[in-house]
């Protein structure tokens, strides 16, 4: 159980300020087409807009092609059941509905706007939504009280030809069902055998028990309890058609009686509804989902006080196993929209629940640990459901939803290439995805590369090597003590034997004598004794790894997680020579641009000659990455105005390139806005750049490092690197304490650099299909496990 001091607290004033400043609300609109010229306006509105108008008039489905309908969801409420606050009116629900719209965009790049309907009459509500429903590709109903919510959703789904999804019902049902699948797996139960008690017969509770029954839980093994006690067959008090479906023949009349011997209890009621004595009476290894918000029916601390063998989930983020609807609705709608589904049906809900359950069993990326203050998550009693900040959700879940929609016949269009679809999904929230997909595909298609992971005993390195091998990017070689590596791998839940990952212990390797002789021959006239070199080879894995590379026993090396960059570089350079010039090159991806920034790690205050070499090396690397290099030498000065010493060095670098007759465009000195804005360049007709620069050569290391780190810190940009370019053999040095995904990225670039090329379009740019939200994002893992669900989907409908 996490320390409860980790709870995030804030005052009422903090909450009001968040929603009020710097502008009221949480959403706004931004155009996705240019609006800079008269021609743009003519195309966007009159007369150009008449062309798609006529096309849609002839075929209404063409709205998916010519408008935002296919990526637009309405979040609609009348405010009769706001969060846990009750019926506070339609306008009081607006902050919640705006929040839902933000979550759609943040997690699945779905555009969403809120609609608050001023009526508590179900028929009036249905009429309003029916008449405006065709505007959207889907409708998310929210915070509508039971039982009206059942009627509203059912009728609207019949009246409209788009998905209508009441998240309070089905979102909770899907996430809790995913948790139950895994809790049963951990405790060795079969769904068919569990005895389940539902506390709370509202929309979420009844939908949850219905979905669980469709996955195997037997009706006769369930008991529903509401405010009037057990819902038994023949009860007359406070019954309706939705409760009656779940009534059973049972002698129990109270919750306490129903809980005796139960395997599972689902709480969707109110604080204090479940007592410690009830938990104590349950079967061994009980599964408790106390999901009332903001306070659960019973706290995890109270459960643990009486049952140390329990698996507990709540609806709160400050406890383990949070049942959070954001794990479901963004990705359900993403998959539904992408196949233009007519509804979200039973099969799609089951597919989502099963996919979530399977994802929880995968190795968890380090980015998730960062979001949860360093807490390492691993499948088990305290981690049965993925977390909302797992970056894999966007590409893992929607394909299963989309496939279920196609298989069940509610999709208007088909997705034939699911691997390509997953790649496009990643591009929606990670601007680096398109570039990295092409590089990883090139590495995967090339002859198998042997990549040395020098710090092989580290847990993050072991996990990175495992993922690298699993993704078929090459053969990883881990340097370190085999017993320690295997022990750390086992703790991470990784099976090395099934993948055949190679382990080399430098201290006992039969290559030691060969590597010592080789390195001594290089260093003997630099003051090194042979015993010094022997100690370096035996005890320092960077020397050993670099020697493997130099002697042809490996193709690439990745290192740096336990030492700072400069120390590692010195060690590697004692073994490997520089080909022509050595530079650090960072890749910045932001707002559809791909920029290469140099030098970000090697030359502190480069001379004019070094600046010219940096440009040449960067241009060669960018060309190898399939881009046409266009170099801008950046400075505070614009072609000598104002003058200064650093500007003169840049001008001298230009003269050097003029004399050398290089085969790429270059220009300078200039500030960044001139390099990236064609409108400003019009004031300088002599400039030699045909388009915006894509290589920015900085006048000094500090300006290069600060600028690339600044854009990443501000959010809305992804920075890869710095990549090490120019050694005779391929080595990449990651930052101290690098994450698993950063190590995988570096290893893939290392393998790519070693004799692999890739075909890009000449001006291929990384442009997300829709503008992405300007929020801070961590690097996602470069590779993914291609998921396959094997559980059969029952054909029955809820």
Image: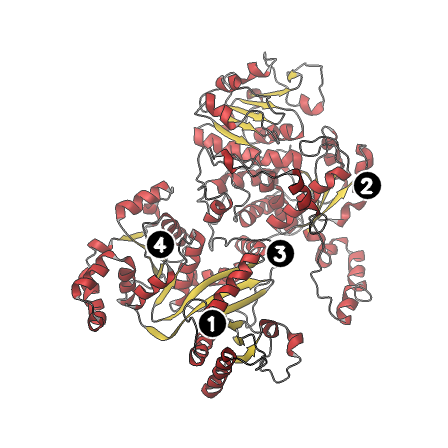
Judged by depth in the image, the label closer to the viewer, 2 or 1, is 1
Q: Is residue 343 above or below residue 667?
A: above
Q: Which mark is residue 562?
A: 4
**Which circle marks residue 772 in the picture?**
3
Which residue occupies 59% across, 24% down? Answer: 198
Q: Image point 43% across, 25% down: which residue? A: 309
* Residue 202 or residue 704, whichever sits in front: 704
Q: Nearer the viewer, mark 3 or mark 4?
A: 4
The reply to whether the C-beta atoms of the residues labelled 3 and 4 are less than 8 Å apart is no
**CA separation, marks 3 and 4?**
34 Å
In percent of width and height, residue 45 lies at: 80, 64
| Mark number displayed over residue 700 | 1
Q: Is residue 339 visible?
A: no
Alpha-carbon span between mark 3 and mark 1: 32 Å
Q: Quadrant of residue 139?
A: top right
Extreme residue toward the bottom, this view: 659
């Amino acid at each position: 159980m996490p320390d409860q001091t980790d709870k995030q607290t804030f005052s009422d004033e903090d909450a009001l300020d968040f929603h009020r400043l710097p502008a009221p609300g949480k959403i706004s609109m931004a155009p996705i087409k240019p609006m800079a010229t008269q021609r743009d306006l003519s195309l966007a509105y009159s007369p150009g807009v008449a062309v798609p108008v006529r096309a849609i008039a002839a075929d209404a489905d063409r709205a998916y092609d010519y408008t935002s309908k296919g990526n637009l969801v309405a979040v609609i409420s009348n405010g009769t059941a706001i969060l846990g606050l009750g019926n506070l009116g339609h306008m009081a629900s607006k902050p919640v509905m705006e929040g839902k719209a933000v979550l759609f965009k943040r997690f699945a790049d779905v555009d969403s706007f809120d609609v608050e309907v001023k009526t508590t009459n179900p028929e009036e509500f249905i009429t309003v939504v029916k008449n405006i429903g065709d505007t959207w590709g889907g409708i998310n109903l929210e915070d509508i009280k039971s039982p009206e919510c059942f009627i509203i959703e059912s009728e609207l789904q019949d009246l409209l030809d788009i998905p209508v999804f009441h998240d309070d019902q089905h979102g909770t049902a899907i996430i809790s069902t995913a948790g139950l699948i895994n809790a049963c797996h951990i405790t060795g139960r079969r769904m068919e055998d569990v005895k389940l008690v539902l506390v709370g017969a509202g929309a979420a509770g009844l939908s949850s028990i219905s979905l669980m029954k469709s996955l195997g839980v037997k009706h006769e093994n369930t008991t529903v309890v509401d405010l009037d006690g057990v819902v038994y067959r023949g009860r007359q008090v406070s019954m309706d058609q939705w409760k009656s479906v779940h009534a059973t023949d049972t002698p129990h009349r109270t919750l306490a009686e129903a809980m005796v011997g139960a395997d599972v209890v689902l709480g969707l009621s109110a604080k204090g509804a479940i007592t410690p004595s009830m938990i104590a009476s349950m079967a061994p290894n009980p599964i408790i989902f106390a999901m009332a918000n903001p306070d659960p029916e019973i706290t995890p601390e109270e459960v643990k006080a009486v049952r140390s063998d329990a698996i507990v989930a709540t609806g709160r983020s400050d406890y383990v196993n949070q049942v959070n609807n954001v794990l479901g609705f963004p990705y359900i709608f993403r998959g539904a929209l992408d196949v233009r589904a007519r509804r979200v049906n039973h099969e799609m809900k089951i597919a989502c629940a099963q996919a979530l359950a399977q994802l929880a069993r995968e190795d968890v990326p380090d980015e998730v640990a960062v979001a949860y203050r360093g807490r390492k998550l691993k499948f088990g009693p305290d981690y049965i459901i993925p977390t909302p900040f797992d970056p894999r959700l966007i590409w893992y879940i929607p394909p299963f939803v989309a496939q279920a929609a196609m298989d069940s016949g509610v999709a208007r269009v088909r997705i034939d290439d699911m691997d390509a679809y997953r790649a496009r999904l990643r591009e929606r929230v990670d601007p680096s995805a398109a570039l990295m997909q092409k590089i990883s595909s090139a590495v995967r298609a090339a002859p198998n590369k042997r990549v040395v992971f020098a710090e092989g005993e580290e847990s993050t390195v072991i996990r990175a090597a495992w993922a690298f091998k699993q993704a078929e990017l090459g053969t990883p070689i881990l340097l370190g003590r085999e017993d320690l590596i295997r022990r750390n791998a086992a703790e991470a839940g990784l099976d090395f034997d099934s993948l055949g990952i190679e382990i080399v212990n430098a201290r006992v390797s039969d290559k030691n004598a060969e590597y010592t002789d080789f390195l001594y021959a290089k260093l003997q006239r630099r003051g090194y004794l042979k015993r010094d070199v022997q100690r370096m080879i035996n005890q320092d894995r960077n020397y050993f790894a670099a020697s493997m590379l130099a002697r042809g026993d490996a193709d690439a090396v990745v290192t740096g997680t336990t030492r700072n960059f400069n120390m590692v570089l010195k060690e590697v350079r004692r073994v490997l020579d520089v080909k022509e010039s050595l530079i650090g090159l960072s890749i910045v991806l932001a707002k559809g641009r791909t920029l290469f920034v140099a030098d970000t790690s090697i030359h502190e205050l480069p001379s004019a000659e070094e600046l010219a070499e940096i440009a040449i090396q960067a241009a060669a690397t960018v060309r190898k990455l399939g881009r046409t290099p266009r170099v801008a030498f950046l400075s505070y000065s614009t072609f000598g105005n104002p003058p200064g010493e650093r500007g003169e060095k840049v001008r001298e670098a230009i003269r050097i390139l003029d004399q050398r007759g290089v085969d790429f465009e270059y220009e300078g000195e200039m500030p960044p806005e001139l390099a990236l804005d064609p409108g400003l360049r019009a004031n300088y007709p002599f400039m030699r750049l045909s388009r915006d620069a894509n290589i920015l050569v900085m006048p000094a290391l500090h300006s290069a490092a600060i600028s690339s780190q600044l854009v990443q810190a501000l959010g809305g940009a992804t920075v890869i690197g710095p990549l090490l370019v120019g050694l005779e053999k391929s080595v990449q040095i990651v930052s101290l304490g690098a994450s698993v995904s950063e190590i995988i990225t570096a290893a893939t670039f290392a393998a790519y650099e070693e004799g692999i090329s890739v075909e890009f379009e000449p001006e291929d740019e990384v442009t997300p299909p829709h503008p992405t939200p300007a929020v801070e994002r961590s690097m996602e893992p470069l590779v993914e496990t291609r998921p396959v669900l094997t559980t059969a989907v029952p054909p029955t409908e809820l």
